[in-house]
Image: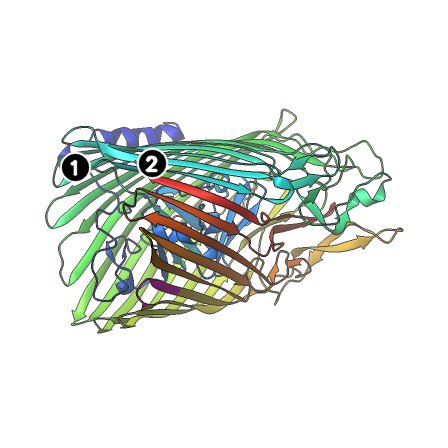
Amino acid sequence: MKRYDCFFVALLGVTALTPQMALAQDFTSETDESQPASTGLGDIIVTATRHEAKLQTVPVAVTAVTGDALASADVSTVRSLTQVVPGFIGSRNMGVFQPVVRGVGSTGISVGDEPNIATYVDGVYQPESAANWIDLVEVERVEVLRGPQGTTFGRNATGGLINVITPDPSFDFRGKASLRLGRMRRDAGDYDARLYFTGPMGDKVAADFAALFRKNDGYIDDLVRGGTLGNQRVIDLRSKLLFKPTDNFKVVLTGEYFNQESTTNSPQPLDGNTAGNNWPGVIVPTRAWQASLTEVPLLNLTRWSAALHTRLDLGSVLLETTTGFLNLRWRQTTDGDASNIKLSNFPAVFESESGSQEIKLSSANPGRFQWLVGGYFYQFGGGAPVLEPWTTTNPALPLAGPSLTPKLDGRSFAVFAEGTYEVQPNLFITLGGRYTTETRWFSQSNNGVLLVNDVSKTFKKFNYKVGIRYEVTDKTNVYATYSTAFKSGVYNMAGISGTPVNPENIKAAEFGIKSDPLEWLRTNLAAYYYDYKGLQLQSKAPTGPGYILQNAANAEIYGGEFETIINPVRDLRLRAAVAYTHARYKDFPNAQGFTPIVNGNGNYAGNVAAPYDASGKVMTRAPEWSGNVGFDWSHDVGNGRVTLAGNLLWSSRVYYDFANIFSQRPYTLSNLSINWQPGSEAFKVGLWVTNLTNEKVLQTVRPGTLGTDGFYEQPRKIGITIETKI
C-alpha cells in the first residue's frame, strides 16, 4: 500500500462511522466563555488540557485571549500575538512563520521541517511554517501554551503551541462586516475588509461563512526601479457546516481557501553589509524600509484545507475525532545578496500535502478521576520542483548552485493517555504518556541526475508528564509539573545528503501559581527550567544562498512569566505581563559563525563563514526581558459609548546569530485606538494607529557569506474602521 493510501483509508474509515461511533473536537467548545464567574473578572473556558476547564484551574502556563481582546489590542494575525503573549516572538524568515516561546523555536524554512511551536486551528494541526499566516477573521479565542506539550498534543511541540478556536455555526442568524482603511509612509494604502455570518439551514443543520480581503500598497522604497516594494494581497475564505441530528451528537465540516500574492520578501543589507559593495554601480540602502534588488521579488502561496470534526456524548464518556487535510503551493524569488548587483538569487517552488487523524475517548462526568486515551496518525509529502540558486558569470564570485529537486515524505503514529486523580480533597495528581513512531523518506536529484534515492529513517520515542496541583482556596491554585517532548530527526530540503539531523529532546520542570486574590485582580506566575538537547538549527550555507541544518549539542533555559489583569473600577481594565528568559547554548563548538568583511573602500562586503564555539552564548530570538501592557476604557457619550484602548510591547536585545554579533536593539511597539458605538450597537466607527512611534524593528536578521540582511516590521499606520452588524 502506498504511503498516502494509508491516510485516505483512515479518512474513509472516519467518514463512514455510524453516529454511535462518531467523535468530537476539543477546541470548538460550546461553553460560553463569558459566563458569570466568582470574580468580577469572569472566567474563560479553555481546552489546554484537552478537557474544558476554567483558565485559572488548569496546571499549564497558558495565555488565553478572547476575540474582543484581540480586536482591542489590534492583533489580527497569529504572528502579531507577540503583542499580548509574554515570552512569545512571532519571528519570520521571508514567507516562513517562525514562532518562538521561551527561547524555543524552529529556524527551518523547508517543507517537512515542522515548527516546534505547533499551530492548531480548530483542532487541526498546521504542519507547514509557510502556511501558517493565519488571519483572525472570526475567533472565539486564542490559547498560547508555553512549555513542552509532548503527551496529549505531542506533535513536535517541544516549545509550546498555539490554538486558534473559531466559533461553530449558530442556529440563530447573526453576522457582521468591517472595513479598515489606513495609510503608511509614502501614502501607501492599507485595506482590510472582513465579513462573517452564520445561521440555520434547517432544524438540524447550520452554516457559517468568513471572508477576508486584505491589501497593502508597497511601503519599501525601490531604489533601482523607483516606486515601492512590500505590497501584499490576501484572500481568505472559510466556511463551516454543522450537522446536529441529536443533542448528544454533532458533526462539523470545515473548508478553507487562502491565497497570497506579495513582494514582502524584500530584504535590505544591515549596516550596508552586502557583497555587492565589491562591484561598481552598487546601490546600498541607508535607511529602514528601502531595498535595492536585482529583480522584483516574489512571495506567492495558495493553501487549501479541510477538516472533519465529530463529537458523540455517551453519557459518562465522550468519543471524538478530528480529521484534517492541507495542500500548499508556495512560490518565491528572493535576492540572495540584497543588492542590485546580479550575484545571487533564490527562486523556488515548494509543494506539500498532509493529512492527520486523531481519535480520542475521554471522561465526561465530574468526579475524582478524569482521563483520556487516544491515537494520532499524521502523514505528509512534498518537494521542490524548482530550487535553483544562481549567480552572475563574474569569475571573482563563482557561487552558482545546483538545480535541486528534493522530495520528502513522512508518516507518524502515536498513542497517548493521561489521567488526573483527586487523591484527597483539593489535591490532584496527573500522569500522562505518549509513544510515537515516525518514519521519514528523502530523495534528491541534481539537474535530473538522481543523487539520493528514497533513503529513510525511523524515530521512536516515549514521552511523559507528571504533575501535581493543589487548590489552596477556591480562588488560588498552585501546581508543579515535569514533562518531556521531542521533535523527530529531519532531512535538509536544501542539502544533498541522505543523513538526517538527530531528534531534539527537551526535559522541563515548571512551577506556577494562579490566583484571583480580589474580585478585581488576577495574578498568574510561572517559573521553569529546561534541559534542551540536540537542537535542530538552520543557518545560511558557507557559499551561495542555500541553508545548512545542524544539531547543537544542548542548551539550558530557565526563567518565568508574570501576568496580571486589574479591573479597578467599572469600564476600566488594565493588563500587564513580563517575561524573563535566560537561554544559553551549552557545548556548541561547531556552530556556523559569520564575521563581517571590510573591503578596500572601507565598506562591509559580506561575511567570512567559519566554525564558531557558541558555548555560553545567548540563544537566537530569546530576549532576556520582554513584556506588554494594555488598557481598555469605556464611557457613555450621548446616545452611545466611547472606548479607548492601547497596547505597548517592549523587548530587550534580540540576537539572530550563534556568535551574538547581529541583533535587534531593545525596542517598543505601541498601538492606540478609539471607537464609538451607539446604544443599539448596530455599528461601530473608530480611529486607530499602529507602531505609534514609527519604531524600526527587525522581524529577522540573516547573516551569510553574501552579506547580512533583514526585514523590518511595517512602519506607522493610521486609519479608520467601520463595522456593522448584519
Residue at (63, 31) in percent of width and height: 404
User: In the image, residue 81 lies at what x, y percent?
Assistant: 45, 52
User: In the image, residue 421 lies at what x, y percent?
Assistant: 19, 64
Residue at (38, 41) in percent of width and height: 723
Residue at (19, 58) in percent of width and height: 370
Name the N-terminal-most of marks 2 and 1: 1
Closer-to-camera residue (589/683): 683
Closer-to-camera residue (672/142): 672
Quadrant where the C terminus sits is top left
Mark 2: secondary structure = strand
Position of 359 compared to 481: left or right?
left
Q: Is residue 452 magenta?
A: no
Quadrant where the N terminus sits is top left
User: In the image, residue 53 lies at what x, y percent?
Assistant: 24, 57
Q: Which residue occupies the extreme front position in the image?
A: 638
Closer-to-camera residue (129/639): 639
Tag 1 residue:
21
Compared to residue 314, the image places residue 298 above or below, namely above
Q: Identify the mark at residue 583; answer none if there is no mark.
A: none
Mark 1: secondary structure = helix
Boundaries of the magenta span = 569-574
Q: Identify the mark at residue 196; answer none if there is no mark.
A: 2
For the question of whether residue 286 can be seen, the reply is yes
Quadrant location of residue 178? top left
